[in-house]
Image (cartoon, rainbow, N blue to C red):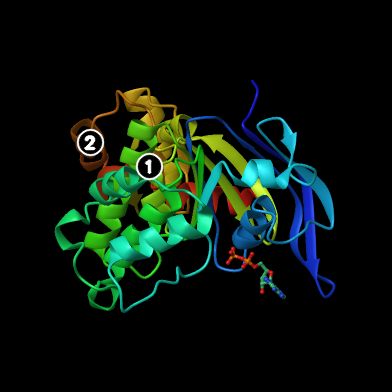
Amino acid sequence: MDHMIVMHDLRKSYKGKVAVDGVNIHVKEGEIYGFVGPNGAGKSTVMKMLLNLTRPDSGDITIWGKKMEEESSECLKRIGSIIESPYFYEKITGRQNLELHCEYMGFHNKERIDEVLQLVDLRDIEGKTVSHYSMGMKQRLAIARAILARPELLVLDEPINALDPEGIREMRTLFKRINQECGTTILISSHILSEVEQIADTIGIIQNGRLLQETAMSEIHKYQKDFIELEVEEASRAGCLLEEKLGIRDFKMITEDVIEIYDSAASVNEIATVLVREQVMFLGIGRKQKSLEDYFFHVITEDE
Ligand code: ADP
């Protein structure tokens, strides 16, 4: 499959300290790609290299089949981004800020300002000066500015950092709208896994400058399927009973007293009944689902 963005073996060090260590990333046209990793993992550095704000020591980036290094101005025209905390003129309104940005970009289209203000839901308060905006409103204005020139790709570095839960929810809805209604491909970084989980089509997991995994969300959902967690005094004996009495074989001993049962036909009631009958003490039993955090730690521990 042809990818819209291909980053190949990207490397970058700052004063001898490795920040990005041989990263390969593949983003498909039209998707939301979640770039996930703890603070300091190298996400911003990768995004800055993608936007030609900093140069890789080695490796290359291809967007729309063009080498970023050779045709950066052509590529950058087609990209909108929010990389660091967005700066606005506080004493003028959101609309005036967007008008100034249009002037600066040489992009003159008043109707498009109306459109983006509508899209990010700032029409009602467009008369307010930015100094009276909440953090969430400023973030929406930043997104309005980033999509003004109808970019085909939107690069967002930690856009939900510092927002309250309501603001985060609004952002999530907004990103999905931009992706679906405008067909914009979105590359979004975050350390808040559960947020990316809800919107991304593909996830790239980065740690210590290395991309540990690049996976379709649909694959992760397979990992996230329901299971039964059983907490017992003697996991080994309980395991034998599961096999012998209930024919359950798809389970894993997690610790000496915890078993995870993945067999979708297994019933909590039946298991509990057998354990009681066989006098195996159990402390808890219930259905659970793996979160993206679990998946993330699973990937990280496999790598160690
Ligand atoms: P993330 O975005 O995942 O939090 P960054 O890409 O910002 O990670 O940082 C990766 C590593 O590179 C960190 O150790 C950070 O301290 C270092 N780093 C980033 N930018 C610079 C810089 N301009 N000068 C020196 N070190 C930097």
Residue for point 27% across, 64% down = 137
Q: Is residue 299 above or below residue 215?
A: below
Quadrant in which residue 213 is drawn:
top right
Q: Estimate the x, y position of residue 206 in percent, counting from the top left.
A: 62, 53
Say what amino acid the circle numbered 1 marks. Answer: Ile
Quadrant in which residue 44 is drawn:
bottom right
Discs 1, 2 touching: Cβ within 8 Å: no
Q: Earlier in the sequence, mark 1 or mark 2?
A: 1
Q: Estimate the x, y position of residue 275 in percent, counting from the top left.
A: 26, 40
Residue for point 55% across, 45% down = 79
Q: Estimate the x, y position of residue 299 in percent, counting from the top left.
A: 58, 48
In the image, taking residue 273 as reference, residue 24 lies left or right, namely right
Residue for point 23% across, 36% down = 268
Label 2 environment density (alpha carbons within 10 Å; few <14, some 14–19, many ≥20)? some
Frontmost residue, 243 versus 290: 290
Label 1 environment density (alpha carbons within 10 Å; few <14, some 14–19, many ≥20)? some
Q: Is residue 170 above or below residue 247?
A: below
> Which residue bears the numbered disc 2?
268
CB at mark 2 closer than 8 A to ligand 1? no
Frontmost residue, 58 versus 80: 80
* Image quadrant where one finds the C terminus: bottom right
Q: Is residue 82 above or below residue 204?
A: below
Quadrant in which residue 27 is drawn:
top right
Q: Tag 1, which secondary structure?
A: loop
Distance, label 1 to label 2, CA atoms, is 32 Å
In the image, taking residue 207 as reference, residue 181 lies left or right, namely left
> Which residue bears the numbered disc 1?
199
Q: Is residue 48 above or below residue 114?
A: below
Question: Where's ligand 1: which quadrant?
Answer: bottom right
